[in-house]
Structure formats: C-alpha cells, structure tokens
Image (cartoon, helix red, strand yellow):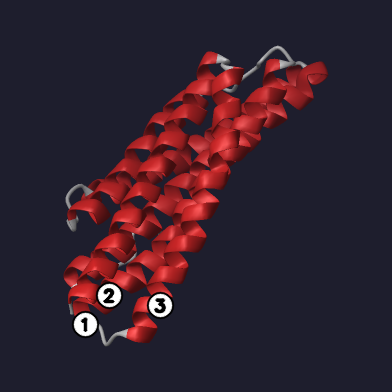
Amino acid sequence: MKKFEEDMRKVVNNTCDMGSLAVSLLKDSVSALTDDDTEKAQSVIDRFDRITYYDGLIEEDAIRILTLYQPTAIDIRTLSTILKSITYMERTAKNCKNTAKAELILHETKHNQIPEIEEMGRIAIEMIEISVNGFRNKSVEGFDRLRTLDDRLDALRNSSLADGVAFIEKDPQETASYLQSITVSRYLERIGDQACKIAEKVTYMVCGKHVEIDT
C-alpha cells in the first residue's frame, strides 16, 4: 500500500509540474509576441521538449499503476483525469510553441498584429491557470467562469479573423504578417478549448460527474 501511495503521489506531482510548465510556456509565448521578444520565443521552443518528456513519463507511470494495483474509485478517476489532461496540456504547449515560431516570423516583418491578440492572450492564460490550479488543488473553484471566458475568446477569434481579412485587403503587401496573426488567434482560441477540457476532467475527478464546459 505504501508503494502504491508513493507512486500515486509521484504521478500527481509530475502532472502538476507539467501543468505549471504549460502555463509558463503560454505566458512566455504571449509575452514574446506582444513584446517582440525573440529570445523569449526561442526559449519557449527549446523548453517544449520538457513537455514531451513529461507526457511520456506520466502516461507510462499511470498505466503501470492501473496494471499493478487495484485502485479505488477515486484513484481510478484521478488516473483517468491525468491521462486525459496531459494530452490537453501537451496540445496547449504545442500551440505555445507554434505561437513562439510565429513571433520569430513576425519579427522579420513589420510585426503587424490584429488588435484582439493581446486580450486573447490574457484570457487564454487565465483559463489555463484556472484549470491547472483546479487539478493541483482538487477543486472546481473558478470553473464557473470558464464558459464565459471561452465565449469571449471565441468572439475575439471571430473578430480577429474579420479584422485580419480587412487589414489584408487594405495592405496586401503585408498579407504574410497578418496571416501569422490570424493563425496565432486560432492557437489561443484552441488553448481556451483545451483549458475547458482539462476542467471537465477535473470536475469528474473531484465530483464524480461528467460536465460539458466547452460547448
């Protein structure tokens, strides 16, 4: 039993660490983009390998626990949540990596950005922090805000697409730059969706019930 508890504690702690790293990558990728900071963008790209490491390690450990032990219902829910959440964390980090790559491209242009990007970045960060903190604290606190934040993120994504097209029509020579910003807005919108998915799984872990936040 002691070995089981140690293994569970390890896989939970590693998942918390992976979530914290995903939050850090998101903050740095958004900051790199808004500040035109190529060094920070490159740091995000370089640190993505750590996410890949956690993803493989946690999945292997969680499956091993399920195979070797006979977990209780709450432990099974925890392991199920972990296996799903690390997938969404990895996808979040990949979107951060792609955002950082976009910054490196934008740096070589006029760094034209559509105005919605900065607010979208703030919202995406808040959403990921809420969901990751929920897992860490075994709590659904703040989850009631996620649907509202996700709706706002979706609205900004639609607005950014319309603005991007308008900017391209006005200044077609800068099409490549604006297309990068439009693509980034899609990355940020997807991160919001991934935050909702993590929160759905955490709700199942904590409350034992399935909910749908990302509608």
Q: CA distance from mark 3 to mark 1?
A: 17 Å
The image position of residue 207, as x and y in percent, is 17, 69
Q: Which residue is at 42% across, 30% downward?
A: 27
Q: Which residue is at 68% across, 30% downward?
A: 180
Q: CA distance from mark 2 to mark 3?
A: 15 Å
Earlier sequence position, callout 3 versus callout 1: 3
Q: Which residue is mark 3?
A: 64
> Which of the pair 67/146 is nearer the observer?
67
| Kind of residue sitting beneath label 2 | Arg
Q: Which mark is residue 73?
A: 1
Q: Which picture quadrant has residue 201?
A: bottom left
Please tell me whether mark 3 sits on a helix, a strand or a loop: helix
Q: Is residue 188 visible?
A: yes
Q: CA distance from mark 1 to mark 2?
A: 6 Å
Q: Is residue 162 left or right of residue 13?
A: right
> Which of the pair 212/19 is nearer the observer?
19
Q: Which residue is mark 2?
A: 77
